[in-house]
Image (cartoon, rainbow, N blue to C red):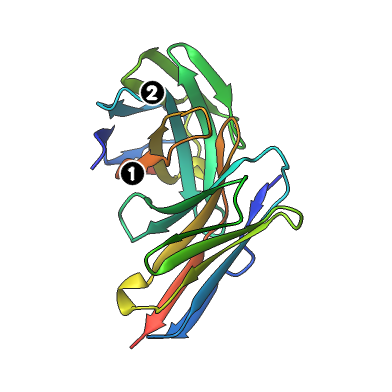
Amino acid sequence: DAGITQSPRHKVTETGTPVTLRCHQTENHRYMYWYRQDPGHGLRLIHYSYGVKDTDKGEVSDGYSVSRSKTEDFLLTLESATSSQTSVYFCAISEYRGVGFTEAFFGQGTRLTVV
Amino acid sequence: DQQVKQNSPSLSVQEGRISILNCDYTNSMFDYFLWYKKYPAEGPTFLISISSIKDKNEDGRFTVFLNKSAKHLSLHIVPSQPGDSAVYFCAASALDMRFGAGTRLTVKP
């Protein structure tokens, strides 16, 4: 199994509070992603990173920010949590081999509930 | 805008028969396509992939077909087994990786 760890695995937070989710990898992969999974929507890309301090927005980036100060860590922050951000969040990693990306490896997910 | 679409939320097949899962995409910049399998309370796991320069890739019981002109790909599972029951996600990558909404496959004994 790819070395990718998400923390925390479960979190309940109150509306309006900031929340940070952490993704840690030991594979030295350049690309890291944050997705959210919601019924009927599948996996939607929030933000991704293509290197240290290099990040870009995905499909549903509003209300989220990310940071990547080290290759191994990719942080997702909900600046002011809302109930619509209740979801399961997945981190993924991949690499680029010149002819295309490798398959992405996923973490176990973080179930976030905003009350 | 959803660039990767799986229009069938669910599919049910008998054990031993063929399962065909479909996926359409809109972005012609996608150059690599993947299928993932997901069980409840777990992260998705990679199943099979195909580069845009190919039209078929086979791995055991799993075959992925790509029709670039139609912007369509499909996953064939033959023969289907009860253990294949899961949610299957289609994904496409260019600079990032986008996923469809998923298809829940149920294989009945």
Q: Quadrant of residue A60?
A: top right
Q: Residue at x 31, y 20 (%)?
A: A72
Q: B12 above or below B105?
A: below
- Residue located at (40% from left, 79% from top): B79
Check residue A75 in the rendering and tell me which mark sits there, or answer none.
2
Camera-side residue: B25 or A13? B25
The N terminus of chain B sits in image quarter: top right
Q: Position of residue B53 (x, y in %)?
A: 62, 45
- Which of the pair A33/B51 is nearer the observer? B51
Q: What residue is rendered at 42% in x and 29% in y? A: A95
Q: Is residue B60 left or right of residue A42?
A: left
Quadrant of the image occupied by residue B77 = bottom left
Crowd rating for badge 2 (residues with CA inside 10 Å; few <14, some 14–19, many 20+):
some
Q: Which mark is residue A109?
A: 1
Q: Secondary structure at mark 1?
A: loop
| Amino acid marked by disc 2 | Leu
Mark 1 belongs to which subunit? Answer: A
Vertical comparison of A76 with B98: above or below = above
Tell how many labels. Answer: 2
Q: Position of residue B13 (x, y in %)?
A: 46, 84
> Tag 2, which secondary structure?
strand
Tell which circle, 1 or 2, labels the residue nearer the N-terminal end.
2
How far is the residue under mark 1 from the one under mark 2? Answer: 14 Å
Amino acid type shown at disc 1? Gly
